[in-house]
Image (cartoon, rainbow, N blue to C red):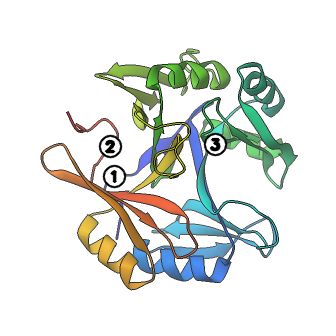
Amino acid sequence: MTPTEPAPLTGASAPCWVHLVTRDLDAARRFYGAVLGWTFRPGAMGDDFVMARSGGVPVAGIGAVSSDYHVAVAWTPYFSVRDADVVSDRIRERSGTVAVGPLSLTLGRAVLAADRDGASFGVWEWTGRAASLATVGRPAHAWLRLRTRDAFDAAIFYGEVLGWESGEPGGCEVAYVKEEVLVRCGGRPLARISSGAVESAPDPMVRPHWQVQFPVDDVAATVREAERHGGTLLERRNVGAYRSEATLRDPDGGHFTVTDVRSPADPHDD
């Protein structure tokens, strides 16, 4: 299924990447290739990493981890930052958790963290020659929705950690829409923060988490294709009057959402 309207990734503090950790790289390639129409190329981080592409454009990373390690199979969003050390300190100072990093990789430095309600996210600092890419708009075939206990408190946390509302060119701004927070980066909506998740609930769909949403033309057809290849439908929702989204679990347990909503700024449930 092809994305309906790619949104650009721009500037510091914007969402810049989504990454899947899985235990079976070949199975993940077969599943996402069939369901989302992706193709794959080897990544720069070794044999256990591939770059997913849609229409020739990089859209996501998929990395394998040994089943001997107790690492959750999950999609994680990454946000662009200018200094991973500074942002790591900000996360800790605001009662978040830094689990990994800053870790130096081929093109930059990565941090895996969790906000103070437990939602996992990453930050990425471009380094060396690749640092010039941090301010270049590039197409992205996903947007994000944070489901958390208190959207306004979460907006404060991420705003302070990532420098939203800093006024930097290409930076992110927040707007309060009803009881949600809309995040615009470079003038384009890329993420939404919604209240309602319960911190202590065992269900990962209820606990605070970043939901990675891939736009498709036909949600029902994508769900059928996912189920045909071993995926599971977890939730189907109407979005406004004419749109819908479906949360799926891939065969290895990774959760993701497909949607025919063209932008996070489109009307959601009243």
- Using the image as rendered, state which of residue 219 and residue 43 is in the foreground: 219
Which residue: 73% across, 30% down?
82
Secondary structure under tag 3 reads strand
Residue ID for mark 3: 121
Which disc is residue 5 wearing?
1
**Image quarter hosting the N terminus:** bottom left
Q: Residue reaching furthest right?
A: 104
User: Sequence order check: which comes first, mark 1 or mark 2?
Assistant: 1
Cα–Cα span, label 3 and label 2: 21 Å
Find out whether the residues at labels 1 and 2 contact each other: C-beta distance under 8 Å.
Answer: yes
User: Sequence order check: which comes first, mark 3 or mark 2?
Assistant: 3
User: Sequence order check: which comes first, mark 3 or mark 1?
Assistant: 1
- Using the image as rendered, state which of residue 171 and residue 215 is in the foreground: 215
Residue kind at label 2, given as amino acid type: Ser
Q: In this view, does 244 lie to the left or right of 107?
A: left
Q: Is residue 165 above or below residue 109?
A: above
- Using the image as rendered, state which of residue 26 and residue 173 is in the foreground: 26
Residue 62 is situated, as x and y percent measured from the top left of the image, at: 64, 66
Name the image quarter holding residue 68: bottom right
Look at discs 1 and 2 and give the one toward the viewer.
2
Residue ID for mark 2: 263
- Using the image as rendered, state which of residue 252 and residue 47 is in the foreground: 252
Look at discs 3 and 1 and give the one toward the viewer.
3
Number of on-image labels: 3
Which residue: 65% across, 29% down?
116
Residue 32 is situated, as x and y percent measured from the top left of the image, at: 49, 74
Residue kind at label 3, given as amino acid type: Phe
Instruction: Report if residue 218 is visible in the image.
Output: no
Mark 1 is surrounded, within 10 Å at the Cα level, by few (under 14), some (14 to 19) or many (20 or more) other residues, namely some
Q: Is residue 237 above or below residue 8?
A: below
Q: In this view, does 200 lie above or below 243?
A: above
Residue 154 is situated, as x and y percent measured from the top left of the image, at: 53, 25
